[in-house]
Amino acid sequence: MPKAARFFSSLSSPRIFTERSALPARRSDTSEFVAIALFCGIGLFVSLVAVILGI
């Protein structure tokens, strides 16, 4: 009967994030979202102006 091979991973245990350590990540995600929203909003505004002016 064959024996199962055992593999031990060299990965460290996963980190446990508390509410305080997760706050900087949330701020980063929020700032990225704001940047993308502004970029899209400006693009939509330029497109709207172009359609209104008939360009």
Image (spheres, rainbow, N blue to C red):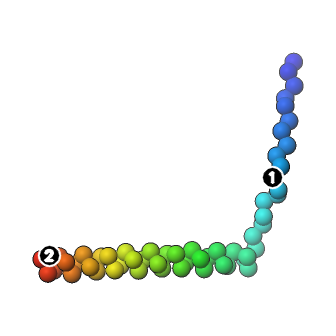
Is 29 displayed left or right of 8 in the figure? left
**Residue that appears at 55% across and 78% down:** 30
| Type of amino acid at the residue the image marks with label 2 | Ile
Reading the image, the residue beneath label 1 is 11
Q: Are marks 2 and 1 in contact (CB under 8 Å)?
A: no
Q: Residues within 10 Å of mark 2 (few under 14, many from 20)?
A: few
Residue 1, position in %: x, y?
A: 87, 18
Q: Quadrant of the C terminus?
A: bottom left
| Type of amino acid at the residue the image marks with label 1 | Leu
Q: Which mark is residue 46?
A: none
Is 46 displayed left or right of 30 in the figure? left
Residue 25, position in %: x, y?
A: 64, 74
**Residue that appears at 82% across and 57% down:** 13
Element assignment for label 1: loop
Element assignment for label 2: loop
* Count of marks, rendered view: 2
Residue 4, position in %: x, y?
A: 84, 29
| Residue at the farthest top position | 1
Q: Which mark is residue 55?
A: 2
Cα–Cα span, label 2 and label 1: 58 Å
